[in-house]
Amino acid sequence: MVTKDAKPGRLRRALKTVSHSVAYARHLARGNHFAGDMSWTRPGSPPVVLAHGFMGTRGTMIPLTHRFQADGRVVFSYHHGTFQLRSLRSSAQQLVEHLGRLERELGVTQVDMVGFSMGGLIALHAIKFMQAQRWIRRLALLGTPSSGTWVGLAGVSTVGLVSPSVWQVLPTSPFLRDLRDAPLPEGVRVRQVSAAQDAFCPRPDLLKGVDKERDYLVLPGGHSSLVVAKPFYVKLREFFDAPEPEQAVRPAGASVASARAQRAETESTVEEATPRVVAAADSGANLGAA
């Protein structure tokens, strides 16, 4: 919608973006150590794992943490190294190990994940190349530069000698090329959410496997707005709360006789298969874990 006088609207958006940046900096300063809360959960809702961006801390995820907790979700915020200087592949491996620990120590077998900025690249690499879809049901990419960002040159000029990650976010990097070309694993739904005035991570191209009409969203705001402003959170909550696709339903005209025949065939198959199942169980000691 276009207003008659666009200047006041632009000014308001600019002021909001500045206020979001101030709030982001305040939370950044809180660092990586703060109390969590696992006391309020909503039955049937997987926990949410949050991954912060480059030179970020777990503190930057506090606005999202509080909103998800208020809506009944348990939240884990993942810290992937001071300033995120190491390779994004190494950080993705650490994320997979983190998810594995959640399963072993807390029994968490499925999560929804939010990757902010560079954190989204880490999560995307984990599901495409490291089988993290074993745990990740849905992945939201917030301001994630999957097409690259030339802002990475600032990192190259300062810490490029010691940091592989600042090279990996450049638009020409082989890391991003491979990440875009690899298909999404079956069963994982991904949503790309961008901010229209994001100067750090320009709007990326649509990833293969992402529904353009449903899961490719652009809202007003800057880079900090993605984790601070409520409209972005609303899109995350909507994404995670959306029901799974319905299972196929038997046609209304299916006859009772057909259903009985199918049941009889199933019972016969089970009886025939029983000896093989028992034999497999007897030799189970020779089978390795997948």
Image: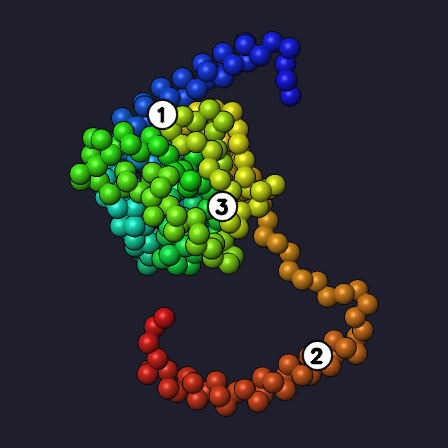
Q: Which residue is pictured at 45% across the width and 14% down the height?
A: 15
Disc 1 to disc 3, C-alpha distance: 27 Å
Q: Is residue 67 left or right of residue 62?
A: right
- Residue type at numbered disc 3: Leu
> For mark 1, does the 10 Å Cα neighbourhood hold few (<14), some (14 to 19), or many (20 or more) residues?
many
> For mark 2, does the 10 Å Cα neighbourhood hold few (<14), some (14 to 19), or many (20 or more) residues?
few
* Residue 38 falls in image quadrant: top left
Query: Residue 24 — which label?
Result: 1
The residue that disc 2 covers is 262
Disc 1 to disc 2, C-alpha distance: 59 Å
Instruction: Pick whichever of labels 1 and 2 is earlier in the sequence.
Output: 1
Q: Which residue is pictured at 51% across the width and 25% down the height?
A: 220
The image shows residue 261, relative to residue 28, as above or below, that is: below
Instruction: Pick whichever of labels 2 and 3 is earlier in the sequence.
Output: 3
Q: Are marks 1 and 3 in contact (CB under 8 Å)?
A: no
Q: Which residue is pictured at 36% across the width and 25% down the height?
A: 24
